[in-house]
Structures are given as structure tokens and as C-alpha cells.
Amino acid sequence: MTPTRHTYWLEHAWLGTYVEPGVALDVADGRVTAVRTGVPAPPPGAEPLRGLTLPGLANTHSHAFHRALRGLVQVGSGTFWTWREMMYSVADRLTPDTYHALARAVYAEMALAGVTAVGEFHYVHHAPGGTPYADPNIMGEALIEAAAEAGLRITLLDTCYLSAGSGRPPTARQLRFSDRTAEDWAHRCSVLKERDHARIGAAVHSVRAVPAHQLATVARWAEERRAPLHVHLSEQRAENDDCLREHGRTPARLLADHGVLGPRTTAVHATHLTDEDIALIGATGTGTCMCPTTERDLADGIGPAVALQRAGSPLSLGSDSHAVIDLLEEARAMELNERLRTRTRGHWTAAALLRAASADGHAALGWDDAGVLEAGARADLTTLALDSVRTAGPVPRLGAETAVFAATAADVRHTVVGGRHVVRDGAHTLVPDVPGELARAVEALRA
């Protein structure tokens, strides 16, 4: 058990804009009480964290059960829509117990990758066929408990999903996602309780899945609770085309017209936007979560992240379908994707990319007091090895660049959440056999 008061000595620490050698981080009751620089050696009683310590990373967009598709959907050809059918086949087989087992292992994998908070975009609510469980929130509770057991903070983004698009009722496979109406969704969500490690947010699955006249109900529920509100936006051109035919406007404009956009809202993907959409998202202060590894895995396209940020949209990052769980790779990919598109380099500094993976991601999930190494912040941090085959060589003051452009999740040495070691020396302290749990949980869903 971690003492109430504790000091970590950080060999090198990223303090938001620069790397500082020799930093003592004092922690009490799960929060940083002091950041002392110029400490060349561990003080008596301090625990040394050798390497480069960053604030804990935030995985802003997750579908935990998609992890069961890794290595399966990458075989052969197809599009997002053929992938979706395979995803539905996994969703069909989820139970509260199998979902808990898989999510616990997936969240433990995230902790091993330096993630301290996850935003779970949760829409598998009911039993197959759409019948509610005796506890209508048992699937969401399974995710909240899984995060606790894996040592992570979670924002459960309970997702409204009502239709198959353009006025069509949900398909047989979508019935377990649906609450019939936004009012029924809101009633069910209102029963969910926050706890020390868990916050409750809302999500609109997409303009396909929530009829326009019901969007305001979801937005109002989130507004009344000052809760995060997330939405899949313009991930596919077909979504845009259908919205234009049905409503005569783009999905972004439709969401704005029904009060969905705003400073507590995060648009996920935002891949196929018009210039007007970009200006609208920026003007409303709506955030954008990019998920580059999933967007390239599904052949979605490259979203206009640079233009969105310039318009005023804060950027965050997510691993979405978990083709890869590596927030450093997500940060790197956002820059490298833009280089491929523009054939120029240097669209973000390493510091800006790390902010997207840490402070701005936590803010998008409602954990505004996490994601920075500052007095008063939550004591959530991750330490990268600087002596691996990927990171050895650069001088430590270039640690931010090393973290973004060289390191991977495999270089995470320690992960601390609320002052407690969740990963120590590369091993999970709460889930002893993460690979084994992943293998068993995935096998149970593929059988």
C-alpha cells in the first residue's frame, strides 16, 4: 500500500514545455503537493524513477471489446463497412462477465502503455435482442469495475444509439445498443453513479444512430450535469452523404443546430469535414479526438487536425479499436500523417503532441486536474526508459522528442495513478498476467 505521503525522485521530468533533470515530486493523498527542481540525487526515503517521466497519458476514445478483433480483421481486403460486420459478431457474444474480463485485461494493457485515464465510448447496453438486463446498467458497471481492478481512471461515455440511420429502426444486431428513445437512454444513464476513479459522461454515437429530433435530449442531459459529451463525427463519407440527403446540411451543422457542439463536447475522428465544418467546430470550442492508428487501419482517411487546431479545437488522442494500444504512436502518427499529406514536416512540436496525449486528453474526459506534473494535480505519471534500443542515444534534454518520435509503449517502465504504482519495472502490480488474461478473454469471444 502506498503511504499517504510519498516522494518520487524523477531522473528526468517533462514539465510541460521542457525536460528538467533531477526533480522531486512530493505526493499526499493522491495529489502532487510540490515539484522541486534541481535535486541531483534521490532524497532520503524518496523512490527513484529512472528515465523520462511524463504526466499520465489519457486514452480519450476506447471501445474495449474491439480489442478482440486485433489480428483478425487485418486479414484480407474490405472497408469500414465490412469491418463493422465482424465487429458486430463480437458484440453479439458479449456478456457482463466476458465484457468485464476483456475490459480488465485491455485496461491493464493500457496501464502498461502509460495510460492513466480512459474514455470508454460504451454502447453495448442490453442483452442480445435488446431486452434490458435486470440491472439495466450491468454492462457499464462491468467496465467501471474493470477499470478499478486495472488501476485506471475511467470516464464512462454512455452512448445513445437509437437507429440504423435515415429513420430506419435498429437492425437485429443493433438492438442491444438501443434504448428506443433518448428519454429512455437518459433515464437509464441517470442511475449510474460516479466514484473516486470513475466519471459518467454522455455520447451521441453518430448522426446515423440518433435521430435529429432526439439530439437535444442527449445534449441537455450532459449540460445539466456539466458532463463530457462525445460524438463520432464524419468518420465516413457515406455518413455525410446520408445527412445531406436527409437534412440538407452536414453532420457538424446538424449537431450544432441541436446544441451538441460546445466546449465540453469532443468530436471523434472528424475525418471528412468541409471548411465550414472546421470553422464551426473551432468557433464553438468543440474538441477533436484523433485516433490515427484506427483511422489508418480502417482506411478512413486523414482528418484535418492542423486546420481544426488552428480554428480553435483542442486536440486529444485515442486508440479506438485497439489495433494498437500506444498513445505515443498515436501522437507520432498525427504528425507523420500530416507530413504524408502535405509533404512538409513540423506541424506540431513534440511538446504539443504530448499535451494532446496528456493534459488535453484528460480535460476532454472531465479530469481537468490531471495530465500535468504540477502542484495540486493528481499524481498520475508514467516513466519511459531512456536506455532501450529505441531511446538510447539522444541527450536527455531532448526527452520530449525522444518520447514522441522514438519511444513506444514497450518503453514504459512505471505507471503511477493517484500516487500508487500500477506498473512497476514494466510489470502490472494488480493484474499479474496481462497477456494471459488477454488471450483467455479474446478466446472466449472468438469461440
Image (cartoon, grey):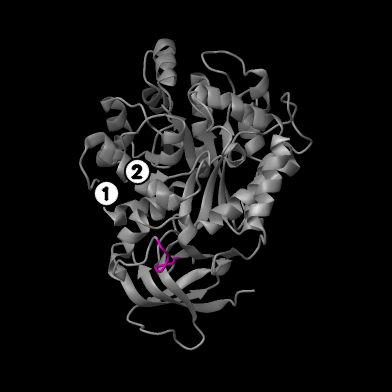
Q: How far from the left and from the top, in percent, is residue 383?
A: 45, 66
Q: How far from the left and from the top, in percent, is residue 115?
A: 50, 55
Q: Which residues are magenta?
A: 384-389
Residue picked out by circle 1: 348
Q: Is residue 342 left or right of residue 389?
A: left
Picture quadrant of residue 43: bottom left
Residue picked out by circle 2: 334
**SS for callout 1:** loop
Indicate whether residue 388 is drawn in magenta. yes
Furthest residue in direction left, as rendered: 344
Q: Is residue 99 left or right of residue 271?
A: right
Furthest residue in direction top, as rendered: 245
Q: How far from the left and from the top, in percent, is residue 283?
A: 29, 35
Which residue sits at x=41%, y=69%? 387
Residue count near mark 1 (Cα–Cα under 10 Å), binned few <14, some 14–19, many ≥20: some
Furthest residue in direction right, as rendered: 134
